[in-house]
């Protein structure tokens, strides 16, 4: 059965069984990923995927069902209707109507026009580049090159029709270095238009690994901390649910009702910018046109993130932040592209500003060591000890603990070195951020 | 189910570029998820994941291709795509593979397709009510429910031809306690590899809900945990996540076979304190991490990992077995058809020891009692791990003096294993989802109560009065 046939039958059947409206979300894609190890391909994966989700509104309640078998549309609609029947929440979740969208141009990612064998060669080159940079690089733990392309089509019985296609490229590598005393690993990635920058990526990863050799904990205590871009963007990603109106309305966010209030130091501005060139998009997960807006402007919370449901409940407009983790998931709320507005100070200037304290370059355990309800975090960290504005030695096996809300108030400087972290469900970018105090556990 | 002829043709096609092994994995997975917030059903979702994956091996090279479309034409194209990774299709492989079907099924009393959403919601409501009524400080109860049946067919050129039906269900209960400006959460997520009867026979939803609620309320009144390097008592059950992270991942062929593990070449040497023995056992009936057959069609087994401190075994899949030149241990798993299988854990636990639970605390001058762990992660190359403590208590002079919040435990697996100085008598397990190369798979972690003589405790609190 073709998807078109499936869609027509599903829509007709939903109407027949009394659904006020119905919506289809169809996604398909192809992916390629290869991992090189010791000059050979050791993992290689290609795919073709497709799936369709149906969402119905029945007696004011909504239900979802998803399938990867493009057959039996009526059965899928029945599942969705069954699910709608058990909903007890009184929240109304309207579907989007016909919209017009701004045209966005996403630059083709770097690996789009490469052949498969060129992509494989790239992975091998990345591994070789790491190995030849320094004699202490003994192995490459993984060395991966990937390319995805896909399309999404969203349509509903209220006239909505939205579609987009995109492609993404990435490479990432983890070299392992040894100096006879210990083993350390480093990491670097490149994505989008930079995804073919092999030498560059290898150099960053190897420097990262070598920089950690000789690392040890510092004494426990409170330190001034310079969070490097990836550490800060990882934290933002972990605490982004705090900005969701859905979480706020459910009682899971301390930012509930804080719109218009100061929640961060006045030097902090955070954008939700769906048009950032890193991954621009015209519409959100329920077809609402995307808009660029400041979430935090000079320290003041301007808005929470809304989809049509939370907006209706709050009596405001959707901010275009409906999310759809995948075609199989229901509509939620999430940032589009979160970005901390860069300041003027370069990294070296920030070290001088830091004077005595720690540079934190990576945080681990973000899926467990953070509590987005309380804002508390306690995370394993690695970085450098800084004295009098100069890096004196690498630091590892420490934890850094604090509270995200308190920390945002304790920001004392914002750097100019904006970078986006490796996307894990969303895009988060930040420059280095200087914090006046975080608790460190070490010796 | 796939016709034998189609399977043969697909495997034949997959070997045309010289692969010495080919494997076809078909999956049809139906699941229902329901979410209840504050006693009201908020969302309900049904999903049918369906597709196939073809894997080929040539020595230690592997290639994987997968597709959602399981028509014969699509399977053949997928086989060609996998084969293409190894080179040109110029071989004519032996097509005389002997296949004899072996069907596995998990015995189920109440299959999920015989119950309705109303039944599911009723179970969830018991949890929501118990959370809300536990304390006036509880502001929010959330209950998430999942049931699924994964049906798989695995056919390979070693002659494996099996089908398996894997029912699983889990209920995740979360409580939030708030007092003005602060919020703390508590959670419990029991799961079982059974049908809906699990909620009658093995999972006590009301009791689990009370535990979650109590945890949130206790943590609301807890000061921040002090930081330092001190002894830590880790309770049984989910406390086993320490072993899962600090040791289990480093024993997987994924790490060992690539020389990326601190435990490489350490078989039959001492890697843990004498009081430590540990096992990975996928054969335990009805357990969350159990499997009838692994995702290469292999037989799961009870794998002895550590015996009295001596390393006895690794967790090995087919590719790992080629790299390590050791037999597979029935440990090959994957989330679904979108992942090539690799070595993973099932039900992994530290075996019961001979120490007394109370004595571990009463003989401690100062330290932490981690009653409930959160999750964590590990770098298998270095063995460095971290995990969070969801419910902790500060101990001084052998007595619990205060609950503490926000603690994390950081260390190196290889060092911590040697520092275990107590292992209790009663072992139990807890359900979790483990994420790795081959996706998220259900695993049980477990242990009796244990004590580590010294560990880095992360926290931001001052001295506990």
Image (cartoon, rainbow, N blue to C red):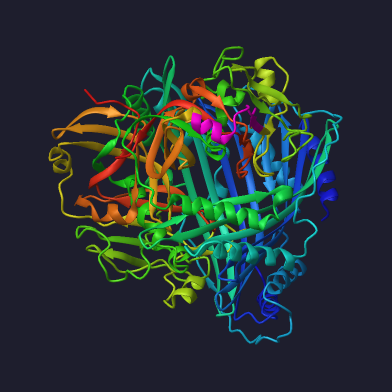
Q: Which residues are magenta?
A: A338-352
Q: Measuring from the top left, give residue A14's x and y in whole percent.
A: 78, 38
Q: Residue A392 falls in which quadrant of the image?
A: top left
Please state which of residues A59 and A221 is positioned toward the viewer in this rendering. A221
Please state which of residues A311 and A209 is positioned toward the viewer in this rendering. A209
Q: What residue lies at 18% left-to-right and 44% top-to-bottom?
A: B357
Say above or below: B307 vs A101: below
Q: Measuring from the top left, give residue A42's x and y in whole percent.
A: 58, 69
Q: Is residue A201 visible?
A: yes
Name the quarter where the N terminus of chain B is drawn: bottom right
Q: Measuring from the top left, give residue A21's x and y in whole percent.
A: 78, 31
Q: Is residue A322 magenta?
A: no
Residue A342 in the figure: left or right of residue A404: right
Residue B60 in the figure: left or right of residue A117: left
Residue B109 in the figure: left or right of residue A89: left
Q: What residue lies at 68% left-to-right and 70% top-to-bottom?
A: B82
Say above or below: A108 vs B137: below
Name the quarter where the C terminus of chain B is drawn: top left
Q: Is residue B337 visible?
A: no
Please state which of residues A76 and A361 is positioned toward the viewer in this rendering. A361
Please state which of residues B138 and A206 is positioned toward the viewer in this rendering. A206
Q: Residue A275 falls in which quadrant of the image?
A: top right
Residue A383 in the figure: left or right of residue A292: left
Say above or below: A124 vs B433: below
Q: Measuring from the top left, give residue A66's x and y in whole percent.
A: 68, 46
Q: What residue lies at 55% left-to-right and 31% top-to-bottom?
A: A349
The tally of labels here is 0
């Amino acid at each position: 059965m073709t998807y078109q046939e499936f869609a027509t039958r599903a829509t007709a059947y939903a109407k027949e069984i009394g659904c006020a409206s119905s919506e289809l979300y169809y996604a398909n894609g192809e992916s390629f990923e290869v991992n090189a190890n010791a000059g050979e391909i050791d993992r290689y994966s290609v795919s073709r995927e497709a799936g369709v989700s149906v969402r119905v509104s029945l007696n004011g309640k909504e239900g979802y069902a998803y399938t990867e078998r493009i057959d039996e549309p009526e059965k899928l609609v029945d599942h969705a209707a069954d699910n709608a029947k058990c909903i007890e929440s009184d929240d109304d979740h309207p579907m989007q109507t016909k919209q017009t969208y701004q045209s966005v141009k996403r630059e083709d990612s770097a690996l789009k026009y490469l052949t498969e064998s060129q992509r494989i060669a790239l992975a091998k080159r990345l591994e070789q580049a790491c190995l030849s940079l320094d004699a202490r690089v003994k192995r490459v733990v993984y060395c991966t090159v990937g390319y995805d392309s896909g399309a999404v089509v969203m349509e509903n019985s209220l006239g909505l029709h939205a579609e987009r296609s995109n492609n993404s490229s990435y490479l990432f590598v983890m070299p392992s270095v040894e100096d006879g005393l210990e083993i350390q690993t480093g990491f670097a990635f490149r994505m989008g238009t930079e995804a073919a920058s092999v030498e560059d990526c290898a150099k960053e990863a190897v420097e990262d690994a070598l920089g950690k050799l000789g690392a040890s904990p510092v004494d426990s205590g409170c330190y001034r901390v310079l969070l490097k871009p990836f550490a800060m963007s990882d934290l933002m990603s972990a605490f982004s649910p705090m900005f969701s109106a859905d979480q706020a309305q459910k009682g899971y966010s301390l930012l509930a009702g804080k719109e218009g209030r100061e929640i961060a130091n006045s030097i902090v501005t955070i954008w939700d910018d769906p048009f950032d060139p890193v991954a621009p998009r015209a519409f959100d997960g329920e077809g609402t046109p995307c808009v660029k807006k400041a979430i935090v402007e000079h320290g003041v919370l301007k808005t929470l993130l809304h989809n049509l449901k939370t907006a209706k409940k709050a009596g405001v407009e959707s901010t275009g932040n409906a999310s759809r983790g995948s075609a199989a998931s229901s509509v939620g709320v999430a940032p589009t592209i979160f970005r901390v507005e860069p300041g003027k100070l370069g990294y070296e200037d920030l070290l001088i500003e830091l004077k005595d304290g720690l540079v934190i370059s990576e945080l681990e355990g973000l899926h467990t060591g953070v509590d987005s309800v309380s804002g508390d975090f306690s995370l394993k960290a690695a970085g450098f000890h800084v004295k009098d504005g100069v890096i004196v030695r690498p630091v590892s096996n420490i934890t850094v603990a604090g509270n995200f809300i308190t920390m945002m108030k304790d920001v004392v400087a914002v750097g100019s070195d904006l970078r986006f972290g490796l996307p894990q469900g969303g895009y988060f970018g930040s420059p280095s951020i200087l914090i006046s105090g975080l608790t460190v556990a070490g010796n | 189910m796939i016709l034998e002829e189609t399977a043969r043709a697909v495997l034949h096609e997959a070997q045309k570029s010289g692969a010495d092994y080919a494997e076809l994995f078909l999956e049809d997975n139906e699941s229902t998820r329901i979410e209840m917030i504050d006693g009201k059903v908020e969302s309900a979702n049904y999903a049918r994941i369906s597709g196939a994956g073809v894997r080929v091996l040539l020595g230690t090279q592997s290639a994987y291709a997968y597709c959602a479309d399981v028509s014969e034409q699509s399977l053949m194209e997928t086989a060609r795509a996998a084969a293409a990774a190894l080179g040109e299709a110029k071989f004519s492989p032996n097509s005389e593979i002997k296949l004899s079907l072996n069907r596995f099924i998990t015995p189920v009393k109440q299959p999920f397709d015989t119950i309705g959403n109303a039944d599911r919601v009723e179970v969830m409501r018991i949890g929501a009510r118990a959370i809300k009524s536990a304390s006036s400080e509880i502001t929010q109860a959330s209950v998430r429910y999942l049931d699924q049946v994964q049906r798989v067919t695995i056919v390979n050129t070693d002659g494996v031809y099996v089908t398996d039906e894997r029912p699983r269900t889990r209920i995740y209960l979360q409580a939030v306690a708030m007092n003005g400006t602060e919020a703390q959460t508590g959670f419990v997520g029991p799961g079982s590899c059974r049908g809906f009867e699990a909620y009658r026979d093995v999972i006590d939803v009301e009791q689990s809900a009370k535990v979650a609620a109590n945890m949130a309320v206790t943590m609301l009144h807890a000061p921040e945990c002090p930081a330092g390097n001190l002894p830590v008592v880790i309770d049984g059950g989910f406390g086993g996540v320490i072993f899962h992270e600090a040791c289990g991942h480093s024993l997987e062929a994924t790490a060992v076979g690539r020389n990326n593990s601190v435990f490489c070449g350490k078989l039959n040497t001492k890697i843990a304190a004498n009081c430590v023995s540990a096992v990975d056992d996928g054969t335990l009936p009805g357990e969350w991490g159990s499997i009838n057959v692994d995702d290469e069609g292999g037989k799961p087994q009870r794998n002895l990992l550590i015996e009295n401190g001596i390393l006895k075994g690794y967790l090995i899949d087919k590719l790992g077995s080629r790299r390590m030149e050791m037999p597979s241990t029935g440990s090959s798993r994957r989330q679904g058809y979108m992942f090539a299988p690799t070595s993973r854990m099932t039900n992994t636990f530290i075996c019961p020891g001979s120490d007394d639970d109370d004595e571990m605390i009463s003989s401690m001058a100062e330290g932490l009692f981690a009653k409930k762990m959160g999750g964590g992660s590990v770098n298998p190359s270095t063995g460095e791990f971290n995990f969070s403590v969801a419910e902790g208590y500060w101990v001084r002079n052998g007595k619990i003096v205060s609950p503490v919040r926000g603690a994390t435990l950081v260390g190196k697996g290889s060092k911590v294993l040697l520092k275990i100085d107590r292992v209790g008598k009663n072992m139990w397990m807890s359900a979790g989802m483990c994420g790795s190369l081959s996706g998220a798979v259900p695993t049980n972690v477990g242990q009796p109560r244990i004590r580590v003589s010294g560990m880095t405790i992360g926290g931001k609190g001052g001295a506990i009065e």
